[in-house]
Amino acid sequence: MILVTGATGNIGSALVKELHGIGAGPLRGLTRDAARAEFPEGVEAVEADFGETASLKLGALKSALDGVSSLFLLSRLGPDAEILDAARQAGVDHVVLVSSITVQTHPHLGPAAENLAVERMLRDSDGHGDGPAWTILRPTQFASNALWWADAIRAGEAVRAPFADIGLPTIHPADIASVARAALTEPGHRGQTYALTGPERITPRQQVEVIADVLGREVPFAEISRGEAHRGMAAFLGEEVADAVLDVTGGDVNDELLAVRDTVPRIVGAPARTFRQWAAEHAAAFR
């Protein structure tokens, strides 16, 4: 049995479809609202909110892990120490963890340090001899972050973003799912840590141009200062996280962050998906 957490999210929904498509065996998707989950036929929906400690105390986590041999886990989805301890006690054999490339590119930032702490908990569990094997995925910026602009684009307003001409090797979430599928179902991935990127660097200005081309209409773009961007982001992300996001999206880039890697095609056996492909698949969100 494979348990996919975040099963209705950007990565989890794609992973559920891939695993179901290859007949990976019994499959369970964890979601906050099982009644609304649209899983393929035969995929078991389990309802629990890892962000709500109360639901864990009520046994939802233990129930979700019953009979599970492999776990797909998003770092910092909930109380990671409790989740990993429950996985160990449930006899989970393998955990595929989604962390962040910032663990290696910006380890001094708070969110990166938190992700590294989760990675260490997972590795230490295996090192004690009674914990699951592990595979760690460290993706870069998601293409789906462009959905932050959807409201403005639908309203015909300008997209306002800092660092307009700094390009990052943005990754399609489905490519993270494809690597996770390989790690969960194929040999040779246990004990491995993979940095994941898209096939090319793309700037915010270029992303908006691609979205405009897909929509077949003009989408205005306006570059703003880091300070202006921070004021807007801090309102819903908090001061520290807003600073960290701005560092890794242009304010403090380095060669390690900018590197385009061949990990996705090497593991999946197909080219990494482009930002244009993501935009075409999600055009409805911007209309």
Image (cartoon, rainbow, N blue to C red):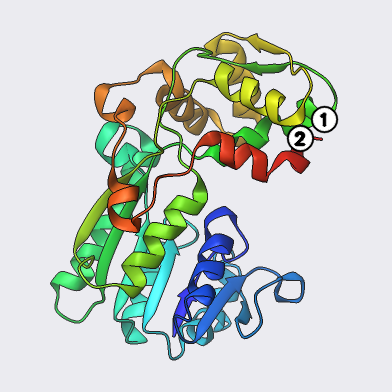
Q: Does residue 252 sit above or below 129 in this rendering?
A: above
Which residue lies under the disc numbered 2? 286
The residue drawn where x is 33% and y is 40% is 101
Residue farthest bottom in this picture: 67
Residue 28 x, y percent position in the rendering: 54, 80
Q: Does residue 8 sit above or below 231 in this rendering?
A: below
Residue 62 x, y percent position in the rendering: 48, 84
Inspect the image, locate mark 2, and give the three-letter code of the amino acid beneath it: Phe
Residue farthest front in this picture: 270
Q: Toward which corner of the image does residue 53 lie, by quadrant?
A: bottom right
Residue 28 seen from this side: yes
Q: Quadrant of the C terminus?
A: top right
Sequence-wise, the earlier of marks 1 and 2 is 1
Residue 268 x, y percent position in the rendering: 35, 57
Which residue lies under the disc numbered 1? 154
Residue 51 seen from this side: no
The residue drawn where x is 28% and y is 21% is 254
User: In the image, is 256 to the left or to the right of 185?
Assistant: left
